[in-house]
Amino acid sequence: MTNLIYFTFIILISCNSRKVENNFGEEQQMIRKQSINIVQTDTTKRPFQIIFNNVSEIRMGSPYNACDIEILGTNKIQLPKASWQDIYAWSDDSKTLILVKWEIDGNNYPSFKLIKVDTETGIIQESIPMLGALNSLTVEGSTVRYKKFYYNKLKSKEKLCCYVEEDYTFK
């Protein structure tokens, strides 16, 4: 009799544990579905895809990254071999792409160039070198508006500061 009660108890526990596992699996699938929906919020159709590879800090402890760029979906664009920042901006019509190329030599302050890519022809234009590191960037026609971090002793009065917003216009 004791064995029968013990055996029944084991069967009931194992049946309940399967239900818990099934519910747990369903909950995980729901969570995955929700996160996929959240990730796919950008509905703008772009002519190709940009992938950042080998992302690492530009300098140890820096919040800014250097990487390689891979472009998937077009053969028109031939980027120079360089160290790139992991930030870019599209124009609203997707005809212009702005990339950021690091210009670093030795232990000097970091500088960068804005790289304008005509996505239809593949023509590339470079800006002048600019001191600092980019935080954000937008494109409006031939003008690029960007926010950067740049330490300037005169402006900062010896404090670590200086987030600057500027415009650059390609000719």
Image: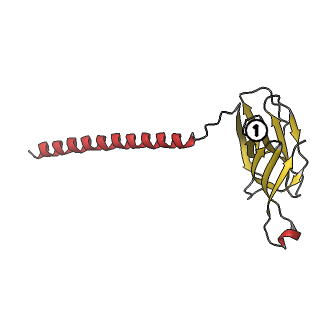
Task: Depth check: give the residue in front, 26 or 13.
Answer: 26
Crowding near pointer 1: few (<14 within 10 Å), some, many (20+)? many
Task: Depth check: give the residue in front, 52 or 123.
Answer: 123
Secondary structure at badge 1 equals strand
Q: Which residue is mark 1?
A: 69
Q: Residue at x 77, y 45 (%)?
A: 139
Q: Position of residue 114 (x, y in %)?
A: 84, 45
Q: In the figure, residue 127 lies in which quadrant?
A: top right
Task: Depth check: give the residue in front, 93 or 126.
Answer: 93
Q: Residue furthest bottom?
A: 157
Residue 11 showing in the rendered view: yes
Q: Residue at x 79, y 68 (%)?
A: 160
Residue 85 showing in the rendered view: no
Q: Residue at x 82, y 55 (%)?
A: 166
Q: Is residue 59 left or right of residue 45?
A: right
Instruction: Say which amino acid is labelled 1.
Output: Ile
Q: In the figure, residue 44 lies in which quadrant?
A: top right
